[in-house]
Image (spheres, rainbow, N blue to C red):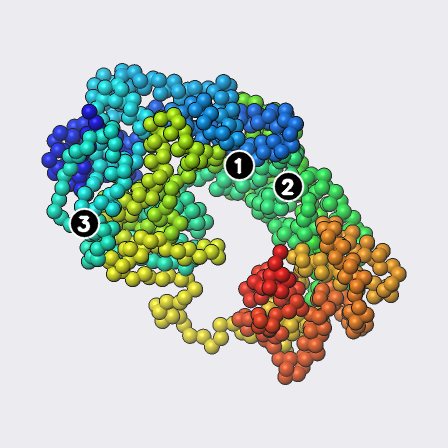
Amino acid sequence: MGRKIYTYTERENLYKCSFWQELKNIPQIVVSNDMKRCLKGKDKKGKPQGIFKSDRNFSVASFDDLKRIILSEWNKPENKYLLRASISRLMKRMIEKSEDEVKKNWLRGCKKNIGGMIDSIQILEEANVIPDDLKYCVNADIQLLKEVWIYLLENETVIGDFKKKMKVLENPDNMCKILAALFALPENTVIDKVVIHGFYYITPIQERVMDLMEKCGIELIFLFPYDSRYGFANEIWRKTYWGIKYENKWISEVTNESDPAGEIFEGCSIEPKNKIVIIEYGSMLDLANGIYKSRNVGSGIYSGNQSEANEILQDFYPEEYGKRRLLAYPIGKFIWCINDMWDEERNEIILTEKKLLECFSSGWLAKDGNNGKEYVEDVVNLMPFFRDCVSISEWGKRMNVLEDIHKNSFSEIPKKNDEVESRWQRVMGNPLGSYSQFSVLPERAHVVMELIRHMLFIAKELFTSDGEIQIADHIKKLRKIIAEIDVTDEVYVEEREIVNRILLKIQNDTTSKIKCFPEDAASALELYLNDVFDDGEIVNDVGDVVYPMFHTESANYLFGKAHICMCDSNSMPGGKASVPWPLSMGAIELLYEKTHKELLGNLIAVKNNHGLANRYFMYSALKCKEVTISWVSKINEKGREASPYIGLISEATNTKIWKVNSTRIGKETFEITSPSEAAVSCYKTEDIPNVVPKEAKMDFMVCPLRYLYGYLLDERPKFQSEFIQSRSIYSLVVAISNLLDSKESGLDEIFDNVTELFPGLQSSDKKAIYKSLTDRTVSDDDGLTGMDEEGGMYFSEERLRVHFPDWKSLKSAIREYGKIGTNEGEKEITFKKPSASYISEGHMSKSHPCSYCPNVEWCKYALFPRDKEKIYGKA
């Protein structure tokens, strides 16, 4: 006899169904916590809520509640870490034993995907698959998974404990006690029937538990919403509940009342009874503002891609997220960076530019009263000097080189009382200041390097051995490091207390006593850093702002309003869901064909029917009194197309798509804006003080925005780009050569001395610079024989070569400079676009002012980034 199936059309009218008297006193297990709240539960304030909140005999629990009782240990981060450390130990041995370099590299790559292996084993275990079943898959990755799986079964208890738990559930007495506890009934209550309510698909672990209930003599009755008139929207139910396990004849409550949401999916045009709004957002900011408005009017927010939506929104509105992970604090980011400095492949500590900047910006890298947060800009400027540094020794040697350069290659210009005059003397007298790494004052560069040395010292203290260690020892070292950091601000004190409490909790955990390698200790801590703790960090119960689509089933009752966001063609309706590496749907289907294990059929159905489920969830959302459907047309400069459902709904309901773009000013904003003669006062050629040196005036004449960025918003322009620095080094060598009158003899010596100032310069760039030097023509040396005076000091015009690395650009700048004082030379900063030497894209050349501009990477009007492929050819 198959499983009985009952269906209804509206959950709110469930108590009116003809079969309800038969089912109302049977305990129910529902698909989600939201559905439990709809039937009988508590709201966020703890007040009774639900259709049957006053019915004392009505018992309901979610499948999540059941999993917490029977599988509480299965998904614990501590146990996942235990498996991770064990697999890592195994694979490290395999790599050491192998003599085949190709195999070693393959194993190293696989070792980076240990998380996928753990998830794969968990999926297969829940589907009652055994390692020997994997013999049918000849794929090398899956055979490695088999080997790892067997090793875990023999050496760890986590999987064995899961198997024992499944065995315990085979006993009817045990099953009844668990269900009694689930429904808060007396322990000796006999439960012989359970209603399974609202499961749009049934996962392997759900089916396995249901099978065990039936083996214990419990009859399962399946109940879900279904309207046979609207087959397209309800297709997921027919797919899920079709087969020999279920009775062919469903007991269904029907209605003659039309359902506009169902009519839409049948291709009919309708006059909607509810309010439907469709929005195309032009940017992520527009999306964030739209979601914020929807929440403020009490709408539930849902998406087929909720993880990306939450990631976007958390950046804009972090206060809306109740989950406070340790990583939400600056100290969490600092710990993450320090913890992530061990490189498994190199078997040593490494430091990358990204990690360095994150540590400095966290505010937790401090020494001798200096806090890295105050030196972030200096770090950015210094980074070209350390471009190729990775290991501790490389960083140490390079810092020594920079200190030597500061000591022996910089001449100090005497400071004067007139700071303006001193500034221009520094600009004119130190051409090396045009390179960002040498623009940092030596005393500030020294502080930065001391902080970097301190950071490397911390990492060495943390990773003292490449052998096996205990996580507890790793945590002890971290706590000691944090305790010794010299910060006193109240915010830092609060963060220190929080992190100490969490680290102590991890340190005292029994899992922390196991042996592992340094990289695994780091990985373990990262699992904790990503986890949500309940001992003081959860500041409210809001949780994620955007929920998965399956929550829409309860949206009408809980909110009455729904906003489906990120509804682009990538997310909705959504294709087949994926499985973790090294599994694939092909491998799962092969296993099903060879082993005939029914639970694998459930897994295949869940993954294949993902799009059908999303279709039903969209249908459910459309039943709300107010529905907003939106997508973002461009994210990270990449266009996104609207979901087909948007076109379907727009056409069926005659709803126009409302375009929201923050760059456009609305009528309301325009009407309340006070009139002004000029938004920004213009800065003209005549406004430039006489004391300003030639190079600054040349910059203004070439492009007023170049002057704005380089001299009004900074002390001087600085080259950070590797490309521009490389070209400017050539010009620096030429300038020195001309000043020393060594155009032929001595050029090699000058070249060698100059390139020693740039130890990060690649050998290919060095060769290109040297070739350009030996191939240059006499005309490249013309016109720079003058001297410029500033505060009683004289400076050679040869310095201008470094400032304008390209000879044609320099000649063009000299011509523009010559126009000062003439009608043609009248320029101004309009803050709209470069006003001089502007050349359309069609006539753009390598000597275009933007090509060698220090601001090319961030100036919104720069042409070069968009067109460098056209000018310089494809890479």
Residue 759 visible in the shown view: yes
Q: Which residue matches tag 1? A: 496
> Circle 3: is it few (<14), some (14-19), or many (20+) Cα within 10 Å?
some
Q: Which type of secondary structure does the marked residue at label 3 adopt?
A: loop
- Which residue is at 45% across, 22% downward? 132
Disc number lying in front (3 or 1): 3
Residue 559 visible in the shown view: no
> Circle 2: is it few (<14), some (14-19), or many (20+) Cα within 10 Å?
many
| Amino acid type of the residue tagged 1 in the rendering | Arg
Q: Which residue matches tag 3? A: 259
- Considering the image in quadrants, where does the N terminus appear? top left
In the rendered view, tell whether residue 653 sits above or below residue 125. Answer: below
Q: Position of residue 350 (x, y in %)?
A: 65, 39
The answer to whether marks 3 and 1 mark residues whose Cβ atoms lie closer than 8 Å is no
Count of numbered labels shown in the rendering: 3
Spatial CA distance of label 2 from label 1 is 24 Å
Spatial CA distance of label 3 from label 2 is 61 Å
Mark before the other along the chain sequence, 2 or 1 = 2
Q: Position of residue 222 (x, y in %)?
A: 22, 31
Q: Position of residue 799 (x, y in %)?
A: 76, 66
Q: Which type of secondary structure does the marked residue at label 1 adopt?
A: helix
Give the quarter of the image for residue 721: bottom right
| Amino acid type of the residue tagged 2 in the rendering | Leu
